[in-house]
């Protein structure tokens, strides 16, 4: 019988082993980073608003969104039954975050300072790296456990 922590739903076979652990680890790291940054944004909304050139509300909404997303990713990572759909949902949310960020920058919806502009561009990097890492790890896991 397999360990309850590695029992998975259809799409992620029970013969998971190290590839499922790697996938969970990537998700946990992503969740932790999102929560830490989200809390940081919320805690420092006023000075960050001045630094980035946006309202405190914008910083707080982004921070709150990151906090909620991080908690959601953590829930996915810790579920007993980790599904392909849930992992793809996390990857899709990361891609959506990047697209929304780039659209916001291209449309000039925010009057960012130079620091705010650079920081916003830089924020897409870890999101893209995690989405890529998660997609690669999921693909590796699915190939390793294919019948």
Image (tube, rainbow, N blue to C red):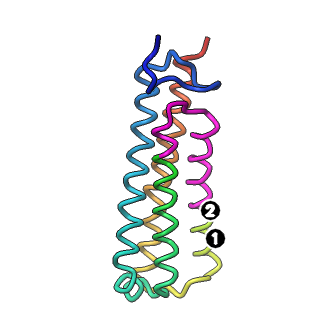
Q: Residue shown at 47%/68% (left/top)?
A: 121
The picture places residue 48, in percent across and down from the top left corner, at 37, 81
Dot 2 alpha-carbon crowd within 10 angstroms: few under 14, some 14 to 19, many 20 or more? few
Q: Is residue 36 above or below residue 80?
A: below
Q: Residue shown at 39%/73% (left/top)?
A: 41
Question: Which SS class for mark 2?
Answer: helix
Q: Residue shown at 62%/66% (left/top)?
A: 100
Cα gap from disc 2 to disc 1, whole angstroms = 6 Å
**In contact (CB < 8 Å): disc 2 and disc 1:** yes
The residue identified by callout 1 is 103
Magenta run includes residue 84 = yes
Q: Find residue 17 and report its image quarter.
A: top left
Q: Nearer the viewer, residue 80 or 15?
A: 80
Q: Is residue 1 left or right of residue 110?
A: left
Q: Residue shown at 38%/64% (left/top)?
A: 37
As drawn, the label of residue 93 is none
Task: Specify start and end residues of the magenta stretch as a single range.
Answer: 75-98
Q: Nearer the viewer, residue 96 or 44?
A: 44
Q: Find residue 142 and report its image quarter.
A: top right
Question: Which SS class for mark 1?
Answer: helix
The residue identified by callout 2 is 99
Q: Is residue 12 left or right of residue 70?
A: right
Q: Is residue 48 left or right of residue 146?
A: left
């Amino acid at each position: 019988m397999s360990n309850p922590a590695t029992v998975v739903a259809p799409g992620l076979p029970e013969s998971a082993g190290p590839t499922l652990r790697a996938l969970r680890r990537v998700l946990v790291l992503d969740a932790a980073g999102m929560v830490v940054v989200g809390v940081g944004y919320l805690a420092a909304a006023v000075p960050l608003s001045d630094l980035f050139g946006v309202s405190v509300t914008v910083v707080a909404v982004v921070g709150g969104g990151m906090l909620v997303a991080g908690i959601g990713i953590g829930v996915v990572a810790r579920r007993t039954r980790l599904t392909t759909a849930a992992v793809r949902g996390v990857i899709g949310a990361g891609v959506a975050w990047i697209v929304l960020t780039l659209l916001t920058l291209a449309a000039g919806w925010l009057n960012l300072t130079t620091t705010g502009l650079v920081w916003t561009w830089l924020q897409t990097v870890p999101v893209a790296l995690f989405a890529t890492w998660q997609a690669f790890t999921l693909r590796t896991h699915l190939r390793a456990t294919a019948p």
